[in-house]
Image (cartoon, rainbow, N blue to C red):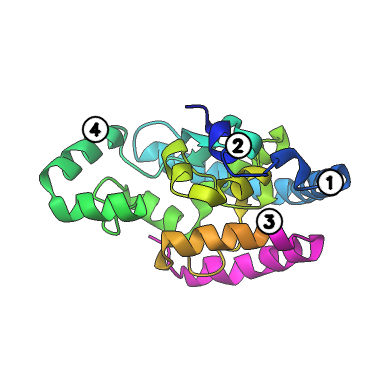
Amino acid sequence: MEVRDVALRAPGFNVGEVFSPAYNRLKRGFDIALCIAILPLLLPFMALIAVLVKLDGGPVFYTQSRVGRAGRMFGCLKFRTMVPNAERKLEQILKNDPAAREEWARDFKLRNDPRITLIGHFLRRTSLDELPQIVNVLRGEMSLVGPRPVTHHELELYGEHAGWYLACMPGITGLWQVSGRNDLSYARRVAMDVRYALTWSLLLDLNIIVRTVPAVVSSRGAY
């Protein structure tokens, strides 16, 4: 099944008609301008993180296939926060631990994930592992603000609301990230994505960006 089919099954829903061309140009221009402004400040910091990740062993970056706007798949970039053989370890954990298997099926995360490296714990708590996604923004695959990028399987959990996710460009930060992150249920996360799509404005994006700083510092809901 193509990812686009998830949205097209919603009666009367047309992804291309949710936002006007003017919206797309305004949001894209905002993303590029802000990226150009902050990238020189972030590059030295990102270089330091890259060195620390490399010293921990394994590659610096991790790329995972995620669903973008209108169902286009893209490689979502992150600093690596797990051991190199993380997928194999996850299979073993889920096979041998029923509680972990239930938690993963519900949240797609493990609160106490043994695969996370020492530097990885810090990067995840502060969301610094997501800084490389600025490259995704510059490529036009993501926005600075939007729904958190999801996998194909996660998108199926959106059900009839999947079209609202597909209408937006996934973002580095968003309502979910500044409202409790992993402390929120998946249903609440979906509701926030729908709310964002329905109420978007440039002021909303600016508000979310400002709220991201204290959310990162407090590490609320991060693990």
Which residue corresponds to the image point at 58% horizontal and 72% vertical from the top-left? 214
Identify the amino acid type marked 2: Leu
In this rendering, position of residue 148 left or right of residue 70: left
Residue assigned mark 4: 88
Badge nearest the viewer, 1 or 2 = 2
Confirm or deny contact between disc 3 and disc 2 (CB under 8 A). Answer: no
Q: Position of residue 9 (x, y in %)?
A: 56, 39
- Alpha-carbon span between mark 4 and mark 1: 44 Å
Q: Residues within 10 Å of mark 3 (few under 14, many from 20)?
A: many
Badge nearest the viewer, 3 or 2 = 2
Identify the amino acid type marked 1: Ser
- Alpha-carbon span between mark 3 and mark 2: 17 Å
Badge nearest the viewer, 4 or 2 = 2
Identify the amino acid type marked 4: Arg
- The first of marks 4 and 3 along the sequence is 4
Which residue corresponds to the image point at 42% horizontal and 40% vertical from the top-left? 80
Residue assigned mark 2: 8
Confirm or deny contact between disc 4 and disc 3 (CB under 8 A). Answer: no
